[in-house]
């Protein structure tokens, strides 16, 4: 299938850069406004921001303006160059992560054959940023937070990878675009009414993946590394002004991007079942899916982020040793069992 | 004790020795962590110096005094009626309860007693300030453990109680309503019905907290078995209030002492818990809040008619003498030792506030716990900075 318009290479590159910015920043802003400002407020019997714009919708811009005006403070004993780089590394991992997410039949940044592998590898780059942020701040709380974060992120990387292996076995490919196609053109025991979104057949994998995502994002109940009532935001303690802003954006942008990857892996990504439109494979898909696809993706992503935030606002946090125990003693055995089950069923059917 | 064979005992000793050797080999340089004076977990300006080994606290010492306001000295240059406005600010979340023991001490010296209606209303307001105080604790507990939602529910429902206190006394936080010989005013019209409906709301709030926090598995795993205070240690350190009752000591001044208040007119249960851990302390407070709403309702049922002020001279001079009165305040036992030389003001006042004694156990309690548990333990001990530093 060919696109209706052919772009020159420079225009494609420009579109990719702009698309990347939109794909990272737009969900981040929406998540912050919808969930952090409004949903949290409604759950806590208050209104949240109401002054800036209608229903406080411009609140985020007001906050960004405030942060940008702030004095650039750095602790005297901090390792200055590394201190400056740390938030950028964290944000960079988010941008690298979005590069393999497909938004439509042609609306994608790269069609990478081992996309799953790449996404999981790149997602752990942020650990580096967090660790050096904690170390270079020259603050004991930051150090504790950074070390806890490193331990936690590495521990939860493993169940995350293992949960995805089930999907990879079932789809038979590591290409995220192909995984979307496999779900939407799939069938469950011969019934193709819904396609085969892997949340149905890989529910254990989905549950493990979402728990691991919760931990990777250091959201409650896994927010021991930032624990604002205890470590005073951990590795972010010494950051203020626009450096804190970058951490803040990265936190919610990463939540959005992880939710995108989860919706690609488990909810059928940008597609709604192909059979609804009489399509059989990706080449038959109409071009308008390049516009509708991102919107479908956005909806699914928001649903998943809602889940993440809902849990975040209602649970107290685990202690560090408890969450390590949870990762190693519960999640990893469960996801290994899931892989075995999937592999056996794949061979049987 | 299970019986062990010789081989088992030797194996146990060997494993202990191996552990000890490993610990010596892995010993790292310690780190001193200052928790406070500005730290969200100390809700005020308490400083706790912790020496850490990894994430384990090996030594801890609270350092109080960052907010010392010298109330004991200030009372010496005030007249007796003026002192209540000072002592209001000691435990600022349950202010009315601070006034009562001082006024009772002054009344004891002057040998007068408030009329029954005044005693009843005093007790009602006392229990209301207990509810206002402890309901905030129940919400704050969530924040300390990472759940941010309960605190807003606590603020929402505490507001009803504060409104009640305000409508009766004119002051939300610092009522300054108690007078020697009675109260400033009678209750406003419609206050009793309003109070009944608020008490029902507060019981719903307690149920919500019970569901949201106390029934939560993460909350239980964070608090059960953390910071256990055995009965004898609690008594040795002079703990009082819910902290003592959570260690299984059935001691409540409301029931156990004869005092010119209306607690003996109602029947109420003193809640104790046998565990002595953080969960027990929180649980006892939750039950006490529930019980306090019931006490208020029962007192409203039996509210006697009559004046709210006894006959007292216009200019209050307290005769020479010494008096000690303590009551069961929201945070624990609070008492005033008042020495009078027959002047307008007290000669010397010694304030025994509950939090100061309650945090004295911190060095003993924090030894060997992990840093996250420090926060749990401090939250469950529940101190108010004004109550420590005075």
Image (cartoon, rainbow, N blue to C red):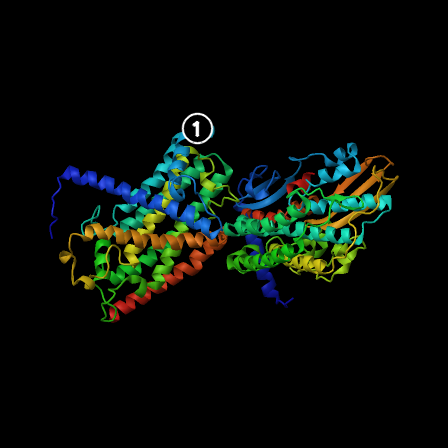
The chain that hosts pointer 1 is A
Work out whether B181 lies above or below B277: above
* Location of the C terminus of chain B (image quadrant): top right
In this picture, residue A265 sits left or right of residue B355: left
| Residue drawn at the location 39% of the way across and 59% of the way down | A332
| Residue B354 rendering spot, x and y as whole percentages | 71, 46
Residue furthest front as drawn: B189
Is residue A242 shown left or right of residue A182?
right
Residue B130 lies left or right of residue B34; in this view the side is: right
Give the image quarter of residue B69. top right
Nearest the viewer among B297 and B99 is: B297
Residue B76 visible (yes or no): yes
Which quarter of the picture shows residue B63? Answer: top right
At which x and y percent is residue B84?
Answer: 74, 40
In what element is the residue under mark 1?
loop
Residue matched to label 1: A71
């Amino acid at each position: 299938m060919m696109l209706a318009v052919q772009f020159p290479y420079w225009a494609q590159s420009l579109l990719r850069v702009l698309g990347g910015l939109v794909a990272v920043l737009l969900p981040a802003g929406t998540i912050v406004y919808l969930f952090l400002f409004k949903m949290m407020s409604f759950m806590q019997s208050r209104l949240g921001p109401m002054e800036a714009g209608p229903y406080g919708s411009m609140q985020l811009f007001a906050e960004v303006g405030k942060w940008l005006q702030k004095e650039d403070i750095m602790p005297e004993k901090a390792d200055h160059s590394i201190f400056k780089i740390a938030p950028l590394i964290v944000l960079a991992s988010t941008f690298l992560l979005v590069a393999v997410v497909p938004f439509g039949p042609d609306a994608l940044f790269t069609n990478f054959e081992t996309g799953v592998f790449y996404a999981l590898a790149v997602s752990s780059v942020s650990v580096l940023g967090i660790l050096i942020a904690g170390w270079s701040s020259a603050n004991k709380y930051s150090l504790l937070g950074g070390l806890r974060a490193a331990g936690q992120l590495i521990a939860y990387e493993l169940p995350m990878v293992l949960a995805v292996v089930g999907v990879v076995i079932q789809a038979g490919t590591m290409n995220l675009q192909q995984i979307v196609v496999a779900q939407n053109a799939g069938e469950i025991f011969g019934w193709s009414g819904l396609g085969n979104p892997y949340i149905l057949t890989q529910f254990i994998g989905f549950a493990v993946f979402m728990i691991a995502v919760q931990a990777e994002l250091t959201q409650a109940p896994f927010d021991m590394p930032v624990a604002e009532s205890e470590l005073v935001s951990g590795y972010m303690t010494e950051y203020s002004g626009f450096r804190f802003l970058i951490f803040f954006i990265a936190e919610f942008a990463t939540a959005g991007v992880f939710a995108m990857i989860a919706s690609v892996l488990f909810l059928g990504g940008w597609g709604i079942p192909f059979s609804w439109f009489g399509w059989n494979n990706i080449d038959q898909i109409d071009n308008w899916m390049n516009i509708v696809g991102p919107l479908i993706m956005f909806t699914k992503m928001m649903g998943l982020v809602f889940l993440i935030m809902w849990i975040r606002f209602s649970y107290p946090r685990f202690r560090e040793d408890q969450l390590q125990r949870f990762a190693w003693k519960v999640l990893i055995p469960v996801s290994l069992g899931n892989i075995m089950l999937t592999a056996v069923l794949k061979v049987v059917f | 004790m299970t019986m062990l064979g010789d081989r088992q005992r030797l194996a146990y000793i060997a494993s202990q020795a191996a552990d000890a050797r490993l610990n010596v080999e892995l010993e790292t340089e310690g780190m001193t962590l200052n928790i406070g004076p500005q730290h969200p977990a100390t809700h005020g300006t308490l400083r706790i110096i912790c020496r850490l080994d990894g994430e384990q606290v090996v030594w801890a010492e609270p350092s109080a005094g960052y907010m010392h306001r010298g109330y004991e000295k200030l009372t010496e240059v005030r007249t007796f009626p003026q002192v209540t406005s000072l002592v209001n600010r000691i435990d600022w979340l349950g202010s009315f309860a601070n006034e009562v023991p001082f006024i009772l001490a002054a009344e004891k010296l002057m040998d007068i007693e408030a009329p029954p209606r005044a005693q009843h209303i005093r007790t009602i307001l006392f229990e209301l300030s207990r509810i206002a105080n402890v309901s905030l604790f129940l919400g704050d507990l969530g924040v300390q453990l990472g759940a941010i939602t309960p605190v807003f529910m606590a603020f929402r429902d505490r507001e009803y109680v504060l409104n009640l206190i305000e409508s009766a006394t004119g002051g939300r936080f610092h009522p300054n309503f108690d007078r020697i010989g009675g109260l400033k005013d009678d209750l406003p019209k419609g206050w009793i019905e309003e109070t009944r409906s608020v008490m029902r709301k507060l019981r719903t709030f307690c149920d919500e907290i019970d569901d949201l926090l106390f029934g939560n598995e993460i909350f239980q795993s964070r608090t059960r078995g953390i910071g256990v205070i055995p009965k004898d240690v609690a008594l040795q350190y002079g703990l009082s209030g819910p902290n003592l009752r959570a260690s299984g000591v059935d001691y409540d001044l409301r029931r156990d002492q004869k005092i010119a208040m209306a607690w003996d007119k109602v029947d109420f249960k003193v809640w104790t818990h046998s565990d002595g851990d953080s969960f027990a302390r929180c649980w006892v407070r939750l039950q006490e809040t529930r019980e306090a709403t019931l006490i208020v309702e029962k007192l409203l049922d039996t509210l006697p008619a009559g004046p709210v002020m006894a006959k007292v001279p216009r200019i209050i001079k307290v005769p020479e003498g010494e008096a000690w009165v303590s009551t069961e305040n929201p945070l624990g036992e609070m008492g005033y030792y008042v020495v009078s030389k027959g002047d307008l003001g007290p000669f010397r006042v010694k304030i025994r506030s509950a939090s100061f004694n309650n945090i004295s156990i911190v060095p003993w309690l924090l030894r060997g716990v992990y840093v996250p548990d420090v926060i749990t333990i401090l939250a469950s001990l529940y101190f108010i900075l004004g109550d420590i530093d005075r």
